[in-house]
Amino acid sequence: MCQNTGCAAQLFFFLFFFSAEYFLLTIMCYDRYVAICKPLHYGTLLGSRACAHMAAAAWATGFLNALLHTANTFSLPLCQGNALGQFFCEFPYVLKLSCSHSGYLREIGLIGVTASLSLGCFVFTVFSYVQIFRAVLRIPSEQGRHKAFSTCLPHLAMVSLFLSTGTFANLKPPSISFPSLDLVVSVLYSVVPPALNPFIYSLRNQELKDALRKMMTGCFSGAIMCLFSGV
């Protein structure tokens, strides 16, 4: 019972944060779109109240998505043991242990709803960036284009990393699916994007750049001193 409760909690929080991050990335794309394509309306369209409402909607949608998937997955009877070939609980692997056909169909329906919502967010992101790039290319000055692109690139890099690893993990062909690869891919899409998120968004922070430069210079100088002192 304790193991099932721990696995359910892990699955819930993973789905919750994963879904919320995806929806927040979509909202941030809208922020970039308004800032570049409709700068004069930015204060009206993205005031503090509007931002709070959109963030609350992202977290609430992520919570509901995680709750529905977790509740349905762990309401199914498990007839093939309770050992998962993963380092954390993922609902596709939990479903493989189930012997309930109706529950499995319910989960497929929930996955269809989640996939439709995710596809809508993806289409919105692509459409927004098409409009953004068209607007940026119309900027006459090279400095202005560079500034606009530098505003979008961290978010675009994060979206690309998040979607590519998650898509490959869940849609890779069965012919190349084996335990060690599944484990590596799960680490990639569950650990790497959140870990790189603060770093990517801080690349435009001049203070962080200066701190990294000083740290690397200090490490290099220390290594040179150690080398010569050893000689």
Image (cartoon, rainbow, N blue to C red):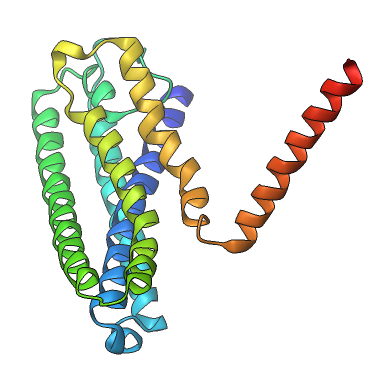
Counting from the top left corner in percent of width and height, residue 210 is at 66, 56
Q: Nearer the viewer, residue 63 or 217?
A: 217
Q: Quadrant of residue 30?
A: bottom left
Q: Assign the N terminus to one quadrant of the image.
A: top left
Q: Quadrant of residue 133?
A: bottom left
Please state if 179 lies on the left or on the right of 174 as rendered. right
Taking the spot 20% from the left edge, 73% from the top edge, the residue there is 135
Q: Nearer the viewer, residue 26 or 95?
A: 26
The answer to whether residue 16 shows anywhere in this view is yes
Above-or-below relation of 205 to 167: below
Q: Assign the C terminus to one quadrant of the image.
A: top right
Please state if 131 lies on the left or on the right of 156 as rendered. left
Please state if 231 lies on the left or on the right of 82 as rendered. right
Counting from the top left corner in percent of width and height, residue 176 is at 19, 13
Taking the spot 18% from the left edge, 50% from the top edge, the residue there is 118
Counting from the top left corner in percent of width and height, residue 86 is at 38, 18
Q: Residue furthest right?
A: 229
Counting from the top left corner in percent of width and height, residue 194 is at 45, 43
The answer to whether residue 82 shows anywhere in this view is no
Callout count = 0
Q: Nearer the viewer, residue 14 or 136?
A: 136
Q: Quadrant of residue 24?
A: bottom left
Taking the spot 91% from the left edge, 22% from the top edge, the residue there is 229
Taking the spot 32% from the left edge, 15% from the top edge, the residue there is 181
Above-or-below relation of 55 to 141: above
